[in-house]
Amino acid sequence: MNAERENLFKHWLKTHKGLVFRVVRAYADSLEDQDDLFQEILLQLWSSIKNYEGHAKETTWIYRVALNTALLWRRTETRKRKKHRALLSACQATIAPQGDNEAIYEPHILEQLYQAIRQLSVVDSSVIVMHLEGVAYDEMAEVLGMSKSHVGVRLNRAKRRLATFMKGLAHDV
Amino acid sequence: MTYNQLQEAWQSQPDRLVLTLDADLLLKEVQRNSRRFELDVLKRDKGEVISCILLALFFAYVSFSLDAWMFWFMVPCCIYFSLFIAINRKMQKGKQGKPSESLDSCIHASLVQLEHQMWLVDHLIVLFLLPLGSGFIAVFSSMLWQIARDGCTVPWVWAFLVGCILFIIGVLIAIYYANQKWFKEELVPRRQELLDLLGSIRSTPE
């Protein structure tokens, strides 16, 4: 049973690591905070595995755990409580070389996007993050515990606010 | 840049950013942290209860072996605290939210736990300070009564015992004000944050 849990956890890490990293970056600014939040999300994911029966989609489950953890995460409490070594340092991120036909996106645009997301309200930021990820409305509704129409209204409002924060970069929302 | 272009840039992150992670290493770290956290919680829960029981036994032993009957006052005090801590923790354990539930349920569970903490601080005097204070003050008051009965006229003995009583009262007052400060600066704002978050999810924006 433990081996199954471990294998599932490792599978989630390998397959959905990008999702977790992007949620961490959307909710934590400094490297120290990102490490704290990353650690917290992994802990919660590990604890939640015993309740995962496979009925929900893996991404729905992981989004729910990651976003709930991020939304309820408190910086000072986590740091006081944990004595851990930096987990993010266990992961090495490298930028792959760009292909010839790839559109060029300046890294600062993504960084501005992350900063703009951090300025949104916590619920709006979770809606925007999932929409940017390409998550369907019904899955977003399931993760957040809202109706689909509520998600739609929230998303439109969040896009308008995002455009304001992006200040001219996103002018068509 | 349009929103759709922002979305493309966002979704291109996994393609351009190659993340190398050692899943086995991460799993070991997570398991280690999980075990440490569970151990900390166990130490806290069981440790406090066992400490109170041991203190009760200690005071009972001191009272009996040294014929110092005044220390018996501390025995019910310690037993009360051990029972209170054990029952309170047991009742709160089942109410913790799971992050795999909906956001609404998670926030609601956090709010319930926070409101319980606020209730404990609100009733601090009755639940903690009076029982604790009564025990200590009874011990030192009975010592005063004992020395008065024995006709002790050494001034520093009287001053010491009265000083102890005043010190205990001072500590209890300090504990009370420290908790009130924590209540106003931490618990009340946190409660408002959670209520706002809950309201934000439940209301349909304009």
Image (cartoon, coloured by chain):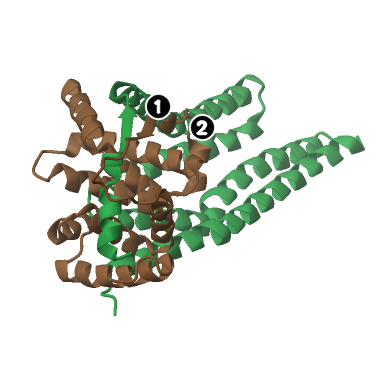
What colour do you see for chain A? brown
Image mark count: 2
- The kind of secondary structure element at disc 2 is helix
Q: Is residue B159 shown left or right of residue B75? A: right
- Determine the chain carrying the residue at label 2: B
Mark 1 or 2: in front is 1
Q: Give the amino acid type for the residue marked by disc 2 in the picture.
A: Cys
Residue wearing tag 1: A90
Q: Is residue B76 shown left or right of residue B68? A: left
Q: Nearer the viewer, residue A146 or A59?
A: A59
Crowd band around label 1 with a 10 angstrom C-alpha radius: few (<14), some (14–19), many (20+):
some
Question: Which residue appears at 51% of the width and 40% of the height?
Answer: A79
Q: Is residue B96 visible?
A: no
Quadrant containing the N terminus of chain B in the rendered view: bottom left
Residue A171 at x, y percent in the picture: 34, 71
Residue B50 at x, y percent in the picture: 47, 28
Q: Is residue A37 above or below residue B195?
A: above
Q: Nearer the viewer, residue A46 or A92?
A: A92
Q: Is residue B81 shown left or right of residue B194? A: right
Which quadrant of the structure image shows residue B204? Answer: bottom left
Which quadrant of the structure image shows residue B197? Answer: bottom left
Q: Give the amino acid type for the residue marked by disc 1 in the picture.
A: Ala
Q: Nearer the viewer, residue B36 or B52?
A: B36
Q: Nearer the viewer, residue B60 or B199?
A: B199
Q: Residue furthest bottom?
A: B206
What colour do you see for chain B? green
Residue wearing tag 2: B52
Question: Which residue appears at 39% of the width and 51% of the height?
Answer: A106
Residue B144 at x, y percent in the picture: 77, 40
Tell me the distance, in whole angstroms, between the alpha carbons under discs 1 and 2. Answer: 42 Å
